[in-house]
Image: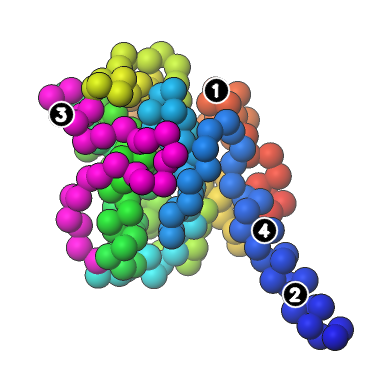
Amino acid sequence: MKRTLTFLFILFSIAAQAQYWLPKSSGEIVKHKYYTLSYNEEEEQANWVAYKLTSKMIQGLAERKNNFKADPKVSTGSASLADYKGSGYDRGHLCPAASMKIDQQAMSDSFYMSNMSPQVPAFNRGKWKSLEAKVRKLTLKNDSLYVVSGPVFKNMKGEIGHNKVSVPGYYFKVIFFPRQKKTLAYLLPNRKIEKEIDTFIVPLDSIQSFSNVYFKGFDNAL
């Protein structure tokens, strides 16, 4: 009995830790196999998308199919592909497709519209893409990381589509290093950026106050 209780305690502790590192905000929590998000119905996109990234996930062989689609798990209905058509904005991944190569389901799930946010093309294909690549390099060095990405609904650039998807003024990316118990946070404007990525490193508190997404206790959880 004692051995069974110990085993159950370990399982409970692991499960609690896995949930504890998720940020806190308003919105509907939606869980997919390899990432979790908080959906903001008013802005028609996620408040944040969180996932654990491992070397195995990056080095997989799943192929990108670009199968963008509505997310059936969002109870109020997610944004649609039509919302972005002719808008002039990219369907910017919050959880990158290139980080979901572990299997074809993971790759396909990364194309749910709940994982998209309207990004200026020069931003999405420029420094945002570079930052995603940097996170993958850091993962290969550290074996695994926790990553949270999201839009900041300030200095908005208007709305797009029938569902009136908000165009955020900024984006954040927060990276947690389990071994070092260290946090690295970025806050970037949704526009073409010429400066180096690390110019946009900010204290984690800045992300919390600017975005209303809270990360209290993350370091302890790791």
Question: Mark 4, mark 2: which one is toward the viewer?
Answer: 2
Separation (CA) of disc 4 from disc 2: 14 Å
Residue ID for mark 4: 17
Give residue 9's position: percent from left, percent from top: 77, 71
Callout 2 secondary element: helix
**Of the pair 136 and 94, the residue shown nearer to us:** 94
**Residue type, numbered disc 2:** Leu
Name the residue rendered at 32%, 51% in the picture: 110
Q: Which residue is mark 1?
A: 210
Of the two numbered discs 4 and 1 in the rendering, the one whose residue sits closer to the viewer? 4
Q: Residues within 10 Å of mark 3 (few under 14, many from 20)?
A: few
Quadrant location, the N terminus: bottom right
| Residue 64 x/y as whole percent | 20, 57
Can residue 109 be seen in this snapshot? yes
In whole angstroms, how far apart are the C-alphas of marks 1 and 2?
A: 40 Å
Specify whether residue 124 is in view: no
Whole-angstrom CA distance, mark 2 to mark 3, is 50 Å
